Image: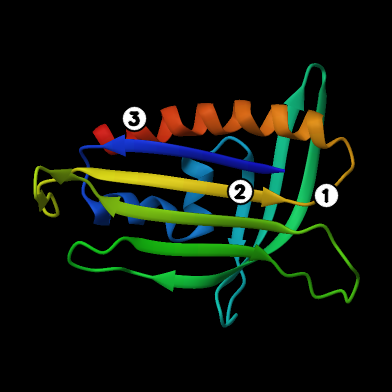
Amino acid sequence: MELSASLRTSATVDAVLGYVRDLDRYTEWMPLVHSAALESGSEPAAWSVELRARVGPFARSKRLRMVRTVMDAGGAAAPARIVFERRELDGRAHAQWRLSVVVSPTSGGTKPLLSSGGTELTMHLSYDGRLFASVVESILRQQVDEGRERLAALLAA
């Protein structure tokens, strides 16, 4: 399953990065992320994440260990790029989860708007699990739409 979503905001690149560079900040705006705890001393940075979603009267949850495998802060007019990937330590095979994040300054004509705002956030989630994939995709899309609205509100404040 592949899922992409974008958000344009007048907030600065740094403001957007403040909400997306560390998974523990996702609990503030992404309803799917029920909890995310940074593992102390992990290098590269890793989080224990619990995803939770409600489907009618039922709640389903999934625990994942996610590692930030790429942290490129970009610079000048270059976009920032962050990648989180599932990396469990139990030695078993698991479905892949991969979240790629790109934070780019938007341009007003020929010049990027860096300090005065104007940013595009693009997130791409890849999941190769097969169990109930169509149901999972529908739930994820709803959660992403709600998260996008919450993040836009936080960035506008």
Return the residue at label 3.
Answer: 153
Q: By what rule are the colours in the image chosen? A: rainbow
Q: SS at mark 1?
A: loop
Is residue 16 rendered to the left or right of residue 64? left
Give the mark toward the camera: 2 or 3. Answer: 2
Return the residue at label 2.
Answer: 125
Query: Along the polypeptide, which appears first: circle 2 or circle 3?
Result: 2
- Alpha-carbon span between mark 1 and mark 2: 12 Å
Return the residue at label 1.
Answer: 129
Residue positioned 41% across, 63% down in the render: 81
- The one of 64 and 1 positioned closer to us in this rendering: 1
* Quarter of the rendering occupied by the C terminus: top left
Q: SS at mark 2?
A: strand
Query: Along the polypeptide, which appears first: circle 3 or circle 1?
Result: 1
Type of amino acid at the residue the image marks with label 3: Ala
Question: Where residue 156 sits in the image (x, y, percent)?
Answer: 25, 33
* Quarter of the rendering occupied by the N terminus: top right
Q: Quadrant of residue 138?
A: top right
Residue positioned 17% across, 66% down in the render: 76
Crowd class of label 1 (few under 14; some 14 to 19; many from 20; radius 10 Å): few
Residue positioned 66% across, 44% down in the render: 2
Q: Are marks 2 and 3 in contact (CB under 8 Å)?
A: no
**Residue 5 image label:** none
Crowd class of label 3 (few under 14; some 14 to 19; many from 20; radius 10 Å): few
Is residue 121 rendered to the left or right of residue 88? left
Give the mark toward the camera: 3 or 1. Answer: 1
Question: Where residue 74 sits in the image (x, y, percent)?
Answer: 30, 68
Question: Where residue 11 sits in the image (x, y, percent)?
Answer: 22, 42
Q: Is residue 75 visible?
A: yes
Type of amino acid at the residue the image marks with label 1: Gly
